[in-house]
């Protein structure tokens, strides 16, 4: 179907509805942002960062008639907005429309854990579970989206930082190895705490991968220091100090 090109004066007026910052327009956009704020509040393009700007899914330069059309306005993070710009929505779209594209109700993002000596690194890809029955066109669109907005690289940076923090937390003050059951309970607990997070997001993919990674237990245990002070040593030190204080008070009283 051929699009009818609007006269410039009409196109400018339509674009001005968005860029002209009237009080009514500002108030309306603030209300729209509040109304579409899920928990956690993440950019729907990368599922990583906090949205801070409006993306015109179909750019207002090319589609002035959609300048203020609610379904064309997507609250996104600044990185994704910059990367997308006016691109990726030509005849072959390369960015998922979060309100319209029918993403399947099953994870499409898979993380893989790579352990090399003392180092651990995760990679992220579009790889739904076998038999998930994802529409091939949606799968291809999601792959183009990942590539266009560099989502895999950003997820790797975020996921690897998260795993390193997790390992440091696990082994802090720990001097005996974890059992598989113990580590499994901790990881499942972290996963449960992320109920309501998007299942294509980095956190869920990372935790699912750690739970299933055969080498993660050995990796964590390789960081455990048998000479570390036993857990609870700070509490024990406080008790000792309290006892000393009590003795001092008794001594002063006599
Ligand atoms: Zn983003």
Image (cartoon, grey):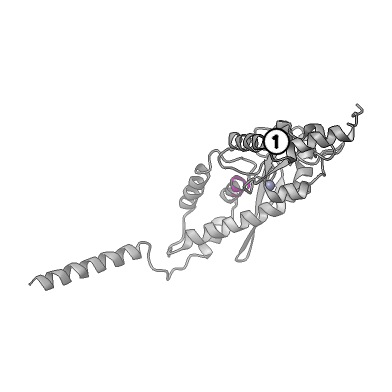
For disc 1, the neighbor class at 10 Å (few under 14, some 14 to 19, many from 20) is few
Q: Is residue 205 magenta?
A: yes
- Please tell me whether the stretch drawn in magenta is mainly helix, strand or loop: helix
Give the total of numbered labels.
Answer: 1
Is residue 229 positioned above or below 75 on the image? below
In this view, the residue in front, 95 or 114, is 95
In this view, the residue in front, 4 or 78, is 4
Q: Is residue 178 magenta?
A: no
Q: Indicate left or right for 99 with 175 as reference.
A: right
Residue 40 % position (x, y) = 56, 42
> Would you name the residue on which mark 1 appears?
98
User: Which residue corresponds to the image point at 53% horizontal and 64% vertical from the top-left?
Assistant: 222
Residue 19 % position (x, y) = 74, 41
Image quadrant for the N terminus?
top right
Residue 102 visible, this angle: no
Residue 17 % position (x, y) = 75, 35
Residues in magenta? 202-206
């Amino acid at each position: 179907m051929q699009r009818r090109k609007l006269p410039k004066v009409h196109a400018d007026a339509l674009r001005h509805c968005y860029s002209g910052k009237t009080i009514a327009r500002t108030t309306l956009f603030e209300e729209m942002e509040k109304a579409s704020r899920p928990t956690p509040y993440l950019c729907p393009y990368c599922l990583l960062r906090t949205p801070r700007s409006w993306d015109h899914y179909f750019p207002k330069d090319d589609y002035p008639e959609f300048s203020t059309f609610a379904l064309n306005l997507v609250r996104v993070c600044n990185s994704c907005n910059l990367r997308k710009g006016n691109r990726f929505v030509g005849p072959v779209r390369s960015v998922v429309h979060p309100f319209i594209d029918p993403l399947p109700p099953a994870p499409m993002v898979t993380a893989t854990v790579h352990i090399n000596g003392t180092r651990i690194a995760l990679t992220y890809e579009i790889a739904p579970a076998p038999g998930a029955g994802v529409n091939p066109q949606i799968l291809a669109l999601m792959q183009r989206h990942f590539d266009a907005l560099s989502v895999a690289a950003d997820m790797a940076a975020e996921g690897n930082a998260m795993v390193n923090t997790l390992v440091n937390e696990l082994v802090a003050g720990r001097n005996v190895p974890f059992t598989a059951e113990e580590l499994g309970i901790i990881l499942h607990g972290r996963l449960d705490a992320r109920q309501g997070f998007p299942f294509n997001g980095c956190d869920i993919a990372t935790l699912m991968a750690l739970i299933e990674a055969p080498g993660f237990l050995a990796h964590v245990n390789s960081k455990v220091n048998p000479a570390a002070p036993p857990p609870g040593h700070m509490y024990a030190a406080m008790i000792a100090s309290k006892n000393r204080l009590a003795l001092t008070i008794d001594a002063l009283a006599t």
